[in-house]
Image: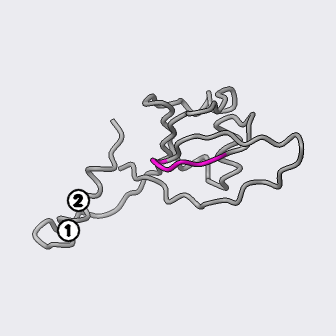
Amino acid sequence: MPVRWNLPKPRPPARGRDDTLIPIQLNGEAREVPEGLTLAALLEWLKLPADRVAVERNLEIVPKDQWPATPISVGDRLEVVHFVGGGALNCETEEGRRLMADRESAVVD
């Protein structure tokens, strides 16, 4: 079941004369990332395990084999989710109902 990744808030790289940051939306939050990144480079920059995530760019899932060739552009809306497995929830408890609602709202179609 896909769940939004709890992304770290990396500090922007040191900015010199040639460093440019571009604005994007990452998991619903406004962020700035270095210009010229691809999806693969963004995951590396964020220190996320590429083998355990899926990426949606502007409402379309990007196949993993296309990440190295997919540039990040100004205004891109990205969702990074990871998959979790586990046992069944007890939906008869308040906690179980809350967790089920959280899971259902995090599912990527």
Q: Which residue is mark 1?
A: 96
Q: Which residue is mark 2?
A: 100
Q: Is residue 24 above or below residue 47?
A: above
Q: x%, y% of residue 45?
A: 71, 50
Q: Residue at x 49, y 60 (%)?
A: 6
Residue furthest front in the image: 17
Q: Residue at x 59, y 48 (%)?
A: 31
Q: Amino acid at mark 2?
A: Met
Q: Where is residue 64, by image quadrant?
A: top right
Q: Is residue 37 above or below residue 85?
A: above
User: Does the magenta-highlighted stretch encompass residue 66?
Assistant: no
Q: Is residue 12 above or below residue 43?
A: below
Q: Which residues are magenta?
A: 27-32
Q: x%, y% of residue 81?
A: 46, 48
Q: Amino acid at mark 1?
A: Gly
The answer to whether marks 2 and 1 mark residues whose Cβ atoms lie closer than 8 Å is: yes
Q: Secondary structure at mark 1?
A: helix
Q: x%, y% of residue 101?
A: 22, 57
User: Does the magenta-highlighted stretch encompass residue 31?
Assistant: yes
